[in-house]
Image (cartoon, coloured by chain):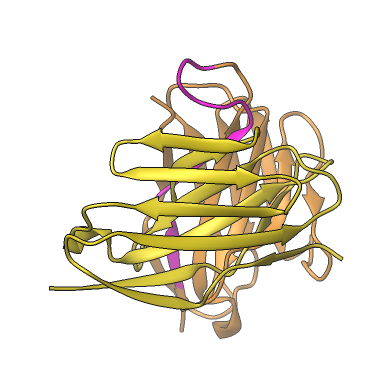
Chain colours: A yellow, B orange
Amino acid sequence: GQNIDQPTEMTATEGAIVQINCTYQTSGFNGLFWYQQHAGEAPTFLSYNVLDGLEEKGRFSSFLSRSKGYSYLLLKELQMKDSASYLCAVMDSNYQLIWGAGTKLIIKP
Amino acid sequence: GAVVSQHPSRVICKSGTSVKIECRSLDFQATTMFWYRQFPKKSLMLMATSNEGSKATYEQGVEKDKFLINHASLTLSTLTVTSAHPEDSSFYICSARDSAPRRGGPTDTQYFGPGTRLTVL
């Protein structure tokens, strides 16, 4: 079967750095997406990785290792507004998105 | 760019009535749109994939006669919840796939509408 695993919840301090991990087992791979979802709102696109390595976009970076079936989202200089759920999703061989359950990130002052 | 709108944002209806939700891609064409539902503190659940000009593909366990999908144009898909019941109360979210190469973004990214919160009394 297809499976995406990410931690249910993480807590971090304002101004610090946090890494949210995602491991996956899917039938085929056509890219990995990270989305941010604030409570009561729809997800918003953060990043996309299809090749191994690190993609940096401002305070957010996303890393991919296809051989290990592993990705992480790195958030730097955390702000209170970063409190949200972070969803990892993998596009399989049929170009369908397989979603993780999301990681709820709690930022404390 | 890549804006998706969804209307209405919130609806309250009586049991037995039908509710139509519209999803529009505002600045790009989307041959494929997706409909999700999400219960509180739960992950997104794909209901169906909507392809312009053809029948929608429903996920296992989703009743196609209850959740009618119409993708009449490259920018509009509608979901109609027929004979709604309280158990249909949920957050319904659409997304549109931007399949055109776009500077600074990957192809096949799904962009989400703001969601529709349905409450059936």
In the picture, the quarter occupied by the N terminus of chain B is: top left
Residue in the foreground of this view, choosing between A35 and B17:
A35
**Image side of residue B28 versus residue B45, left or right:** left
Q: Which residues are magenta?
A: B102-118
**Image side of residue B14 versus residue A40, left or right:** right
Q: Quadrant of residue A107?
A: bottom left
Give the vertical position of A4 relative to A71 (above or below): below
Q: Position of residue B75 (x, y in %)?
A: 55, 28
**Which residue is painted at 47% across and 15% down in the image?**
B103
Give the vertical position of B13 relative to B18 (above or below): below
**Which residue is painted at 37% across and 56% down in the image?**
B9
Q: Position of residue B90 (x, y in %)?
A: 51, 73
Q: Position of residue B73 (x, y in %)?
A: 63, 26
Give the vertical position of B14 relative to A38 (above or below): below
Q: Quadrant of residue A53?
A: top right
Q: Is residue B112 shown to the viewer in this render?
A: no
**Image side of residue A86 versus residue A16, left or right:** right
Residue in the foreground of this view, choosing between B16 and A106:
A106
Q: Position of residue A102 (x, y in %)?
A: 52, 67
Q: Is residue B68 shown to the viewer in this render?
A: yes
